[in-house]
Amino acid sequence: MKFGWLYRSMFVMRRQFVRLLRLRNLLTITFLVILLYIVKTFNNISKTNIGTIDYFVPKSLKKIDWHNYTQIEYERKRQGIGEQGLPARLPKSLAFLEEQLYSVNGFNGALSDKIALNRSLPDIRHPGCKVRKYIESLPTVSVVVPFHNEHWSTLLRTAYSVLIRSPEFLIKEVFLVDDASTKDFLKQKLEDYLSKHLPKVKVVRLAQRSGLIAARLAGAARASADVLLFLDSHTEATVNWLPPLLEPIALSYRTVVCPYIDVIAYDTFEYRAQDEGARGAFDWELFYKRLPVLPRDQDNMPEPFQSPVMAGGLFAMSRKFFWELGGYDPGLDIWGGEQYELSFKIWQCGGRMVDAPCSRVGHIYRKFAPFPNPGHGDFVGRNYRRVAEVWMDEYAQYLYKRRPHYLHIDTGDISHQKKLREKLQCKSFRWFMTQIAFDLTAKYPPVEPEPFAEGRIRAGADGQLCCDLRRGEQGAALALAVCERSAAAEQHFLLSWHKDIRSKDRNMCWDVPDSRPEQPIILYSCHLGGGNQLWRYHPATKQLKHGGNENCLEWEASGRKVFINRCSGARAQQWDIDTVNQHAMARWDKTSLTVTGPFEDY
Ligand code: UDP
Ligand code: MN
């Protein structure tokens, strides 16, 4: 009894304590909600404020020699399998492993594993590159490498080649962005290896397979250096590759720079040139194509030259300009079309793009694509349509004319992209086509001119016999066969406005690699440039003349062979083509394949 007050007051205290606890919970929850809200807003702000990134201003324009001669000397002495970029082969005993790793990669992964991660490469640059200097003040770089189930040694060789061939202080970070790979070694093992051997290289993981566009965006969003440098996950950077990519950006932050992309052979890992440069372009089905370097740029080698479209995977761009352009359209799914989207955007919205001949990076062109595409339907068609709708204006119709079903694909919401185009006051696609890709339409005309002649090509002396390709492979010889329309036969040809003779159904042309008399005509992919594939029909004499060398198509009854021979007026050199387009024929000499210079000087 005596302690009743104590019990009472304890009871009251407990009640107050419980209340207090409830209040605390409430406060904590409120606090958390507010915090979440702030984080979210801040996140949004930081995303929309990306345009305020400072751009790099060089402190000195003095030019210096950036070569790392210690590294060059070290590489020169290296010997062993795959060293110096020489072709390599595995012993027969490893054939089983070789086959297995081929099928999962589309290249010789087993051989790659035997080649050093820091192997030496040859210096195949234009001789002028060896003495070329670059400004001493260059921007820093974040390298972004998306990967999906990449092979171990090719992925790591990509990272090594970047790190060993770049000035250390210019590479701020390397992000390997894992597009939901399923190979076990790409998980913890990769991270352990990197933190031990290559601490600058970080792995970023995507929660689900999202494609290379989303992967590049995720890497770019984390990047903090001045310049974003994108690479494929099976590439090798070569001697002094970085300064030529960075200098044009340092001098003007809206310049985007692509390296020359060399070939790492998928079978032997030999390092070799693809060619000595070309300008990126496309046809009206949006297949990537290349146009010749302009004469004025050829004279200026190895200086960077303007290119209308990037190949896609390998380029350097200031982080500021990338985000000013909104990065990639995040509505582009998996892969495909993103190189057009970014290229059109760069040019139309106030930037420019150049290829740097002194920067060379090797890329493994796979023998075949080993990964299944995720079941997202026709994502390439959808991507193309988004790009066409937002950027290509009236030229989009030429794509739709060839791919009418695109018109039925839902693009999804493109209002943000259209708003961006308006906000940045981007130029028209016509401007791009006439000022930047001005020679594209000569080679890839939006509306194909009619062919000069079309149909079956019959022997004049025997109307039962037709030229036939029998659906042969590249390299197969043209022969004569009884005229027919069966599926096995291939007798329908076009004497196209390119002045080649091509199969009606596939992009294969009559080609004469050896112009001596009695040489066969073989099947070769059409190169649209005359030369070995140049033909002319003369309705009056019924002759089919090859090239400028006065050879005529001739046939021989025994063995039904066809070949070229000195034009003689013989009956065996007469041919009838089903339909000859007189109107087009009359314009033969006016139909030219060569174009010079832009319409206005840019
Ligand atoms: N990639 C990716 N997700 C995909 C497809 C590709 O991250 O769904 C990566 C791939 O690992 C490579 C780059 O994107 O680094 C380009 O793909 P790939 O090399 O297969 O294309 P290719 O060079 O053969 O055109
Ligand atoms: Mn690739």
Image (cartoon, grey):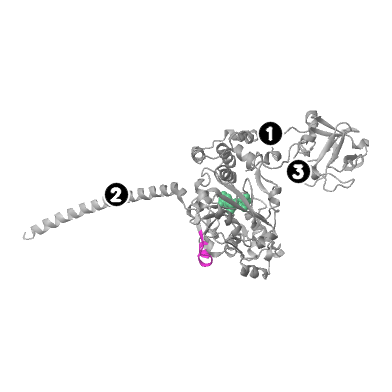
Label 3 environment density (alpha carbons within 10 Å; few <14, some 14–19, many ≥20): some
Instruction: Residue under label 2, please give it.
Output: 30
Q: Position of residue 120 (x, y in %)?
A: 65, 65
Instruction: Residue under label 3, please give it.
Output: 529
Taking the magenta stretch, the answer to whether it contains residue 451 is no
The residue lying toward the viewer, choosing from 598 and 232, is 598
Q: Is residue 239 above or below residue 557?
A: below
Q: Residue at x 62, y 70 (%)?
A: 70
> Which quadrant of the rendered structure holds the C terminus?
top right
Q: Amino acid at mark 1?
A: Val
Q: Are marks 2 and 1 in contact (CB under 8 Å)?
A: no
Q: Position of residue 556 (x, y in %)?
A: 91, 40
Magenta span main SS: helix
Q: CA distance from mark 3 to mark 2?
A: 71 Å
Q: Depth-wise, is mark 3 or mark 2 nearer the camera?
A: 3
Residue found at the very far top of the displayed protein: 583
Q: Amino acid at mark 3?
A: Gly
Q: Depth-wise, is mark 2 or mark 1 nearer the camera?
A: 1
Q: Amino acid at mark 2?
A: Thr
Question: Reading the chain from its start, which is encountered first: label 3 or label 2?
Answer: 2
The residue lying toward the viewer, choosing from 210 and 102, is 210
Q: Is residue 492 above or below residue 261?
A: above
Q: Residue at x 78, y 28 (%)?
A: 583
Instruction: Residue under label 1, please give it.
Output: 447
Say whether residue 431 is visible: yes
Query: Quick check: 57 left or right of 547?
Result: left
